[in-house]
Amino acid sequence: MNLNYLAIDIGGTNVKYGIVNRAGQLIERHSEPTQSENLTVFLAQLQHIINRYAKTIKGLGISVPGKVDHHDETIYGGGALTFLDKINLPKMLDIQVPVGIENDGKAAALAELWLGNLKGISNGAAIVLGTGVGGGLVLNGELFTGTHFQAGELSFLSYHSNMSFDHFEGSLGSAVKMIERVAVALSMPDKHDGLKVFEAINQRHEVAWPIFEAYVMEIALLIYNVQTVVDLERYVIGGGISSQPIVTTEIEKAYHQLFERNTVVAQTLTKAEILPSHFSNDANLYGAIYNLLLKIDSKV
């Protein structure tokens, strides 16, 4: 009997997909640019991927940008893919197996809760650094979605009452924008060459390093603010840049510096542990399948 599932992670830049078995092994993995011209073209891309595997899988798990209302599985917002707003993706796809859909930040948290660095943790969070800042909260050993399924929407944290996106955490904490800033400062021809940017960062380049330092302090401040509200045991840092060890190391260092700057804070609050994501940039694939399995098991 086939025990494999198709996982699809929808991003504004790329669609990643792969085959995952029930034990949580990623058997194969692929990636292709997201066809973001319009909904029709995008749906055709997804259907083409699904058709390759439709006869050999037991279910489909999807990770998406935007809020997913689990009353009816409708997406709201859609992140960079605004044509996903108010779309019920499972109903629009031609597939005859169970479909599970979850927000990308929550999928990352589910992956870590299932088989990663939040396994066995009662209260924790995944913070995903990418185009924006994704988040997923684990409270009392379970994914916490909130009253309106929007808990963990860290990109919408605002630092100014004018509500300009430039003051939102999704902009200030954007790994993509940080990489662009470093690339521009170093006059790199490719403003999205993360590997080249991190070569300079790892070498403590005099131009790149201050930009990176300011960025990790921004993420440390985010963790500090979340910690004052929910008092978690552990945060895991995900997204593509989390594969660079220096990212988590420097975020943790900056986080400790915040406590050292205020005696009352240090005396009152207990610091949380900060670790890299176990699954790095593949977390959403694993989390999409775990979400599907939880959905299937709840109906058994």
Image (cartoon, rainbow, N blue to C red):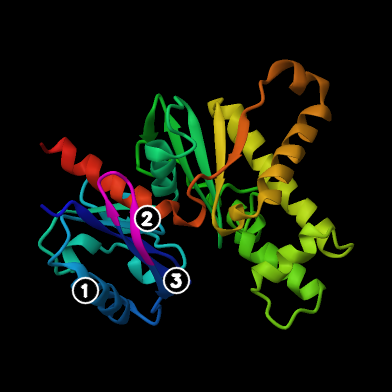
Magenta residues (range) = 20-29
The residue drawn where x is 50% and y is 42% is: 126
Residue 233 marker: none
Q: Residues within 10 Å of mark 1 (few under 14, many from 20)?
A: few
Residue underneath mark 3 = 14
Residue 27 percent across, percent down from the top left: 33, 58
Foreground of the two, 256 or 245: 245
Mark nearer the N terminus (1 vs 2)? 1
Q: Answer whether residue 145 is visible to the viewer in this image.
A: no
Magenta span includes 21: yes
Name the chief secondary structure element in magenta: strand
Whether 201 is drawn above or below 148: the answer is below
Snapshot quadrant of residue 272: top right
Q: Is residue 17 left or right of residue 162?
A: left
Foreground of the two, 14 or 135: 14
What amino acid does circle 3 point to? Asn
Which residue is the extreme one toward the top?
267
The residue drawn where x is 37% and y is 35% is: 143
The residue drawn where x is 76% and y is 38% is: 253
Q: Is residue 111 left or right of residue 176?
A: left
Residue 88 percent across, percent down from the top left: 23, 61
Q: Residues within 10 Å of mark 3 (few under 14, many from 20)?
A: some
Q: Nearer the viewer, mark 3 or mark 2?
A: 2
Residue 275 percent across, percent down from the top left: 60, 38
- Classify mark 2: helix, strand or loop: helix
Q: Is residue 242 left or right of residue 184?
A: left
Residue underneath mark 2 = 285
Magenta span includes 124: no
Mark nearer the N terminus (1 vs 3)? 3
The residue drawn where x is 56% and y is 36% is: 235
Residue underneath mark 1 = 52
Whether 130 is drawn above or below 157: the answer is below
